[in-house]
Image: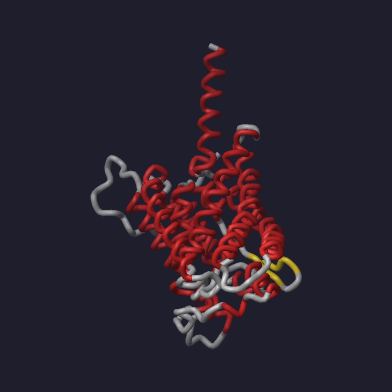
Amino acid sequence: MHVPDGFLDAPTSMATGAVAVVAVGVALRGAKRELDDRTAPLAGLVATFVFATQMLNFPVGAGTSGHLLGGALAAVLVGPYTGVLCLSVVLVVQCLLFADGGITALGTNITLMGLVTVLVGWLVFRLLQTVLPKRTSMVAPAAALSALVSVPVAALCFTGLYAVGGQADIPLHTLATAMVGWHLIIGTGEALITGLAVGSIVAVRPDLVYGAHRVLAARALEVRGERQARA
Amino acid sequence: MRRPSTRILVVVGVLVALVLAGVVSVYASSSPDGLTKVAIDQGFSGTEKVHGVAGGPLAGYEAKGISDDRIAGGVAGVVGSLTVLILTGGLAFAVRRRGATAGRAPDTSSGP
């Protein structure tokens, strides 16, 4: 979903640039609470994995491809603030080193893929956690579902930006339908990769997974409660 | 049950990422992605402008000066992965909560 130069006009690009600057600023402050000596290396791993996996375009039919965006994945593994930082580094490197995603569109791409997918992914994940059983085995499926939702929402946000500052006159309805349609299919790939990646880390080191902290804490309380009840 | 240390987990994870970016990426689909496809279908792909670093040494995920496409793509993927690892690792160590023993200078060695 990397937006190139020339799709959106200058005022819109400047506005998304401002949004991106504020988002990264807030993320830098918030990430302090999520990162410590133990989890900082994981942030490096998550960003590297997202970069690598974004190179793996998978076919989604009719001569079209898609790749992981990784916002939900990063939010669940290292926390939403750190997730925004991970995605932002990936997008800056892709833009400046690989000419992927326009330079004037960097703010747009950070807003769509670095902020919207992380935020939506995290909110849906937290929502699912409140209704699903409090088990670590539920973390990966919840992450997968939130990943599935995050991609079409980001596509819809692009449509909104295009309605405001698109450089061509495209009927909004057809653009929204096409964007959401393709990105629902891409979202299923996103869900699959996110579920597998989160599932494998939860399987070996659930304590390192940010999105599993509440579940682990609740379970520890339960165990303690049972022990007290027995005593 | 033995759990792998954080160090082992990160090393294995990074190795997996390097294989994905350096080897598997060669077999990725080269069809236009969702947005590009929509832009073509709806007729607004023409407003795209040439990228500012389109002539850069790694532009388009192909390392310049390597004639074999697969190797050029693999090298670009590995260089990109390591760049992201160093930048994000350094950033994460710089902003992290300092432990009791942590010194002043941020540990930017990020690697294992």
- The image shows residue A157 at horizontal and vertical percentages of 58, 58
User: What residue occupies the far top of the structure in this picture?
Assistant: A231
Query: On the rendered structure, is A217 left or right of A176?
Result: left
Q: In this view, does B90 lie above or below B74?
A: above
Colouring method of the image: secondary structure
Q: In this view, does B93 lie above or below A106?
A: above
Whether residue A184 can be seen here: yes
Q: What residue sits 48% from the left and 52% below the top?
A: A83
Q: Quadrant of the N terminus of chain A?
A: bottom right
- The image shows residue A214 at horizontal and vertical percentages of 52, 34
Pick the front one: A68 or A198: A68
Badge count: 0
Q: What residue sits 39% from the left and 62% below the top?
A: B87
Q: In which quarter of the image is residue A230?
A: top right
- The image shows residue A139 at horizontal and vertical percentages of 60, 41
Whether residue B11 can be seen here: no
Pick the front one: B107 or A88: A88
- The image shows residue A165 at horizontal and vertical percentages of 54, 66
Query: On the rendered structure, is B94 left or right of A118?
Result: left
User: What residue occupies the far right of the structure in this picture?
Assistant: A62
User: What residue occupies the far left of the structure in this picture?
Assistant: B104
Q: Is residue B49 above or below residue A229?
A: below
Q: What residue sits 67% from the left and 72% below the top?
A: B37
Q: In this view, does B6 lie above or below B86?
A: above
Pick the front one: A56 or B51: B51
